[in-house]
Amino acid sequence: MLPFTDIGPAAPAKPNLTANWERNDTSGFGKIGTGLTESSGIFSFPETGYWLLFYGITILCNGDKSHDVHLDYTANNSSYSEVGRCGYGGEVTGTGYTGMQTFLFDITDTSNQKFVLRTSGTSADDYVQGNTSYQHSGITVIRLGDT
């Protein structure tokens, strides 16, 4: 497993989740191999193969009541398109809601195939929740095998 943790707690929910990512460093965490790399919210794969992504992002709702977390993918390191989305809504201000989704990547070119996560439906008062002591919002990626 190759988790990253989006830390906060005051990371405003904005279109691209570009900051505050860290590799999980809590007790019991394990990984095999190099793991993903991340730069300004853009995730790159260390080797080719089939990769299963799990992502769960918690947004504290203080403004808008409906949110989406989008998974955008590029095959050419330039043009991104949406390949996954999880949507959720909150009825109570001050409550955190978590959207979760999975996606299976077939990675054949580690230089050009990448992904980013972004949010929509958020206001300046909404926050992505995270914590450096445990995985609150984050991703886990598992390499399943060769392509």
Image: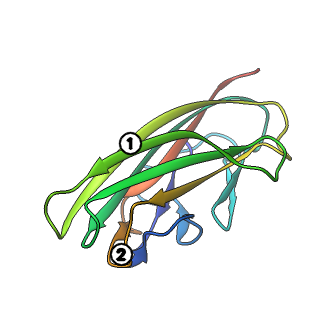
Lateral position of residue 106 relative to residue 85, left or right? right
From the viewer's side, name the closer residue of 18 and 122.
122
Q: Is residue 89 above or below residue 144?
A: below
Which image quarter is the C terminus in? top right
Q: Label 1: which residue?
A: 100
Residue at 53% over, 38% down: 84
From the viewer's side, name the closer residue of 135 and 125.
125
Lateral position of residue 108 relative to residue 96, left or right? right
Task: Name the residue at the left extreme.
Answer: 92
The type of residue carrying mark 1 is Met
From the viewer's side, name the closer residue of 72 and 31.
72
Mark 1 surroundings: few (<14), some (14-19) or many (≥20) residues within 10 A:
some
Picture disc at residue 17: none
The type of residue carrying mark 2 is Pro
| Residue 14 x, y percent position in the rendering | 49, 69
Where is residue 141, by image quadrant? top right
| Residue 5 x, y percent position in the rendering | 47, 60
Where is residue 145, by image quadrant? top right
| Residue 109 x, y percent position in the rendering | 85, 37
Task: Give the mark toward the camera: 1 or 2.
Answer: 1
Residue 14 visible at all: yes
Residue 24 visible at all: no
Residue at 45% over, 59% down: 120
SS label for mark 2: loop
| Residue 67 x, y percent position in the rendering | 36, 56
Q: Label 2: which residue?
A: 9
Residue at 55% over, 33% down: 103
Mark 2 surroundings: few (<14), some (14-19) or many (≥20) residues within 10 A:
some
Lateral position of residue 141 relative to residue 77, left or right? left
Q: Earlier in the sequence, mark 1 or mark 2?
A: 2
SS label for mark 1: strand
